[in-house]
Amino acid sequence: MIRIITQIEENCTTVTIEGQVAEADFGEIRRVRNSVKGEVFLNLRGVKSCSVGGARILRDWVDAGAKLQAATPYLEMILNNPAGE
């Protein structure tokens, strides 16, 4: 189960995700991704674990232009390395 906090500012949106990203959360992550416009920063510091499918969804978001603001070193490596699965 995850918690998603969206902070909309004048020039960007920060999306903070906390908890354990599992298959049950994919729809909510996609819904949030589709709802935000413009520059997006992903704060993933509070992600405790992430399934392979969750990593793919987050990596797709990063590949589409979202910037990692904070993540554990391991999660950052997975999201920045397509062969990291």
Image (cartoon, rainbow, N blue to C red):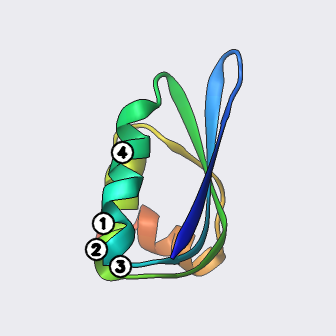
**Mark 2 sits on what residue?**
53
Question: Which numbered dot is residue 36?
Answer: none
The mark nearer the N terminus, 4 or 3, is: 4
Cα–Cα gap, marks 3 and 2: 12 Å
Kindly report which numbered mark, 4 or 1, lies closer to the viewer in this rendering. Answer: 4
Could you tell me which residue is drawn at 37 percent across and 82 percent down? 51
Disc 1 is placed on an element classified as helix
How would you rate the neighbour count of disc 1 (Cα within 10 Å): few for under 14, some for 14-19, many for 20 or more?
some
The mark nearer the N terminus, 4 or 2, is: 4
**Mark 4 sits on what residue?**
31
Q: Which amino acid is tagged 4?
A: Arg
Q: Determine whether 13 is above or below 45 in the image.
A: above
- Which of 1/69 is in front? 1
Image marks 2 and 1: residues in contact by CB distance under 8 Å: yes
Q: Position of residue 37 (x, y in %)?
A: 46, 24
Q: Which amino acid is tagged 1?
A: Arg
The mark nearer the N terminus, 3 or 1, is: 1
**Mark 3 sits on what residue?**
84
